[in-house]
Image (spheres, rainbow, N blue to C red):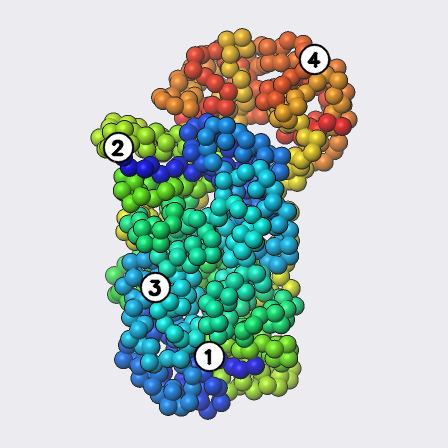
């Protein structure tokens, strides 16, 4: 196959998640520092962690993009130069920016490539040309675009194009929602989004009946674009982004692994005529999510793209049990437990490549080798060693088992 | 400071002319989010406005994806002789208008654009063609004053009108209407949520998508003279959701606002009113409370995190610092609630329970239990 493959760009809300994403195959990760991003409540990276994360990723051939995608006020902008110089020093591969003032500041102070965030809602060729003319090398196009429209932008504006392929979606044009600003006093475009679009609303629609319609009418289903991978490739999309810096390690690892494997299969075979397609889809469903939709990737999102359900109705067939801390014949498999499980539980360990490793937890001990019949969250436990298990791998079990 | 407003009918135009305004914003239904004018209506209204001596501003604030944009942008050329200035919001629309027309440009910088560098950037990009910049209503007074001084072009600010909170191209109300909806019709609703203290959000669905507004309208009329003194160029009054007949009263209040008259106006006005962030914008002050900063402090002498605290037995610390952990190190452990423990290491073991003098990075170190230390406590070198 001669086609250039898009990169898989995974979210990394913390240094641990960066490592998970890279180890599970992501070609690139996007991360946030303590300021200037849109995920104020995420762990985010300290300066030391950014340095370590960039080194970790680069050693494994992955790129690191740093989000500076808040719409900054003047006082915020004053604090930016020092951070930009630091990012250049540690050799981040790009910054992701929404605000023209930030673009100008980064371009003035550094040679760091600039990617225009989806928050800027780049929707057409002319907008991409504008951003290119002021120094951007890539646009992360708005989620309202189809893959074909994005391909046209790439060809006609001659700029790299990145598209979201998976994850939660704003219902509003990104950057054009200020519900939180005016109702909760939290600037959504500086990281304070209160997710008011996920609320249930009673709607008086002037109908004959006095009954108000109750609906989660502003809540979007989650994006899932696995079967559309061939279209992304055919249109020459440069980067496929997975949303979710606030999401779990299991999410980060699963998405990085599955999209990377699917892309690799398509590259090698030129098709998706594989039983693996169903396996990949089943894997995507194992992570907590709202109902999936293609949104506007093929044609404009319609009524079927609305997630008219309460948030806690999200599907979670499987839950994360924990992370492998160490694994060796000497000390066995040490797991940091996030969710409790019982002796005899059927666990799945997600390897960095290939099929899951099944383990039945018949012999559980604490790290002092005392036998256990049930584990507790926030503890370390040991299982007998099994070949193929490595540190940083994720452990899961079927929910409610 | 000049007043500017929208016209949707000949009646509106008459009122605008009567009140001595010098310009009018016209919204074509395919380009303006809430524009109602079709081609013929636009041309007619524009012609009549010009006959009245009014400057005509063509509003293009609909955000358009490529397929729509490519199909529609050239249509503006049909109207080039019928308006004087082109007002855009999307950077693509700005770029297209800059390259494909010679009209003076007005840029709606109401989303974001809360720094002078950005605002100057838009102005500089169009090389002397920028006629006006529309500032965000999230800017506080002192910032507006500073921008008005620093920017080379006149600034405009909303003076009275709805506050748009949310704009999506998806049609969100019509799916709830079952068979009571036909395409292109505007649907209006009022929304409220038990999860929000605010009740009565106006919601509109039209051909361009769905829009939600604040329960209160924005009003800076009481500050009109202050804004005029600071040099604001244009004060926009939006009566598209109320009555154009209010223009006369509002114009009077802007020129000479007496408290009693203003209160009477507020009483009469169909919506409650607010001044938003005009006096102060503190929409970032809550951010520090969104997370536990004691868990976030991982700079400097940071070693790692307590992963397990087993009473009477051990603390398990995941060593993250590349320098590792030596038995001679003195530790400072910060509890998630802030309590600090200073600790000497008496016992240092790995997960194979071997007693060691040093544990390398990314490994688990077991030290003696320290009463009061919990999981997630952060560990530092002293």
The answer to whether mark 2 and mark 3 are in CB contact below 8 A is: no
- Mark 1 or mark 2: which is in front? 2
Res. B357 mark: 4
Mark 1 vs mark 3: same chain? Answer: yes
Q: Are marks 4 and 2 on the same chain?
A: no
Q: Position of residue A27 (x, y in %)?
A: 42, 34
User: Is the residue at mark 2 from the same chain as the one at mark 3?
Assistant: no
Q: Which mark is residue A1?
A: 2
| The C terminus of chain A - image quarter | top left
Q: Quadrant of residue A336?
A: top right
Q: Residue at left 64%, top 40%?
A: B292
The residue that mark 1 highlights is: B5
Question: Which of the two labelled residues, at mark 4 and mark 3, occupies the earlier sequence position?
Answer: 3
Nearest-to-viewer mark from 4 and 2:
2
B343 to the left or right of A262: right
Task: Look at the numbered discs 4 and 1 and tell me whether their residues touch, using CB distance below 8 Å.
Answer: no
User: Which numbered disc, 4 or 1, marks the residue that appears first in the sequence?
Assistant: 1
Per the model, the C-alpha gap separating discs 1 and 2 is 58 Å
Q: Chain of mark 2?
A: A
Observer-nearest of A210 and A357: A357
Please give the chain letter of the residue carrying mark 4.
Answer: B
Write down the residue under mark 3: B208
Q: Is residue B259 left or right of residue A291?
A: right
**Residue B33 seen in the current view:** no
Q: Foreground: B307 or B96? A: B96
Alpha carbon distance from label 2 to label 3: 41 Å
Q: Is residue B246 left or right of residue A222?
A: right
């Amino acid at each position: 196959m001669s086609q250039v493959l898009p990169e898989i760009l995974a979210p990394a809300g913390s240094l641990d998640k960066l490592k998970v994403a890279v180890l599970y195959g992501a070609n690139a990760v996007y991360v946030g520092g303590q300021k200037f991003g849109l995920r104020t409540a995420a762990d985010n990276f300290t300066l030391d962690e950014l340095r370590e994360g960039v080194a970790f990723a680069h050693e494994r051939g992955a790129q690191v993009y740093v989000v500076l995608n808040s719409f900054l006020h003047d006082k915020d902008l004053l604090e930016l130069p020092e951070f930009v110089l630091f990012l250049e020093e540690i050799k981040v591969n790009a910054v992701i920016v929404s605000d023209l003032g930030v673009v100008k500041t980064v371009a003035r102070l550094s040679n760091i490539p600039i990617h225009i965030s989806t928050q800027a809602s780049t929707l057409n060729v002319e907008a991409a040309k504008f951003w290119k003319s002021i120094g951007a090398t890539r646009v992360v196009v708005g989620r309202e675009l189809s893959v074909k429209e994005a391909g046209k932008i790439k060809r006609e504006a001659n700029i790299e194009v990145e598209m979201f392929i998976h994850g939660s979606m704003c219902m509003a044009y990104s950057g054009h929602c200020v519900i939180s600003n005016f109702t909760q006093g939290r600037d959504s475009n500086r990281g304070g989004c209160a997710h008011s679009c996920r609320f249930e609303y009673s709607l008086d629609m002037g109908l004959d009946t006095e009954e108000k319609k109750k609906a989660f009418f502003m809540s979007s289903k989650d994006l899932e674009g696995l079967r559309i991978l061939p279209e992304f490739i055919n249109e020459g999309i440069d980067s496929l982004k997975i949303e979710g810096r606030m999401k779990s390690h299991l999410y980060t690892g699963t998405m990085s692994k599955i999209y990377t494997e699917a892309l690799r299969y398509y590259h090698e075979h030129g098709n998706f005529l594989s039983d693996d397609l169903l396996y990949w889809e089943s894997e995507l469903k194992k992570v907590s999510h709202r109902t999936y939709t293609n949104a506007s990737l093929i044609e404009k999102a319609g009524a079927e793209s609305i997630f008219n359900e309460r948030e806690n109705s999200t599907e979670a067939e499987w839950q994360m049990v924990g992370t492998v801390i160490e694994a060796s014949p000497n000390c066995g498999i040490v797991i940091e437990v996030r969710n409790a499980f019982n002796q005899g539980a059927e666990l799945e360990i997600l390897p960095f490549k290939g099929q899951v490793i099944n383990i039945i937890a018949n012999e559980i001990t604490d790290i002092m080798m005392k036998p256990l019949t049930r584990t507790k969250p926030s503890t370390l436990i040991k299982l007998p060693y099994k070949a193929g298990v490595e540190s940083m791998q994720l452990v899961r079990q079927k929910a409610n088992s | 400071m000049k007043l500017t407003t929208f016209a949707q009918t000949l009646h509106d135009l008459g009122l605008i002319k009567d009140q001595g305004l010098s310009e009018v914003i016209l919204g074509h239904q395919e380009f303006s989010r809430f524009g109602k004018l079709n081609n013929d209506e636009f041309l007619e209204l524009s012609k009549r406005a010009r006959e009245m001596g009014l400057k005509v501003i063509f509003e293009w604030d609909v955000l358009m994806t490529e397929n729509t944009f490519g199909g529609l942008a050239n249509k503006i050329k049909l109207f080039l002789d019928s308006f004087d200035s082109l007002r855009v919001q999307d950077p693509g629309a700005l770029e297209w208008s800059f390259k494909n027309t010679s009209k003076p440009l007005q840029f709606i910088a109401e989303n974001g654009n809360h720094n002078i560098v950005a605002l100057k950037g838009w102005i500089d990009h169009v090389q002397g063609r920028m006629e006006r910049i529309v500032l965000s209503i999230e800017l506080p007074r002192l910032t507006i004053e500073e921008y008005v001084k620093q920017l080379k072009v006149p600034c405009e600010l909303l003076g009275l009108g709805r506050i748009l909170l949310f704009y999506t191209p998806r049609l969100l109300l019509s799916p709830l209407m079952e068979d009571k909806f036909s395409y292109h019709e505007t649907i209006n609703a009022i929304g409220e949520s038990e999860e929000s203290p605010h009740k009565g959000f106006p919601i509109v669905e039209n051909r361009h998508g769905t829009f939600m507004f604040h329960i209160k309208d924005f009003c800076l009329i009481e500050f009109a003279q202050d804004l005029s003194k600071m040099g604001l160029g244009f004060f926009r009054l939006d009566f598209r959701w109320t009555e154009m007949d209010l223009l006369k009263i509002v114009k009077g209040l802007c020129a000479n606002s007496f408290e009693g008259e203003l209160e009477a106006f507020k009483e009469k006005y169909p919506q409650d009113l607010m001044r938003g962030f005009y006096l102060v914008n503190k929409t970032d002050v809550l951010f520090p409370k969104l997370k536990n900063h004691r868990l976030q402090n991982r700079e400097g002498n940071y070693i790692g995190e307590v992963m397990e605290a087993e009473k009477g037995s051990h603390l398990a610390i995941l060593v993250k610092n590349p320098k590792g952990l030596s038995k001679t190190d003195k530790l400072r452990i910060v509890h998630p609630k802030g309590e600090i423990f200073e600790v000497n290491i008496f016992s240092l073991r790995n997960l194979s329970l071997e007693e060691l003098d040093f544990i390398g990075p990314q490994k688990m170190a077991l030290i003696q239990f320290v009463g009061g230390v919990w999981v997630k406590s952060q560990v530092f070198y002293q």
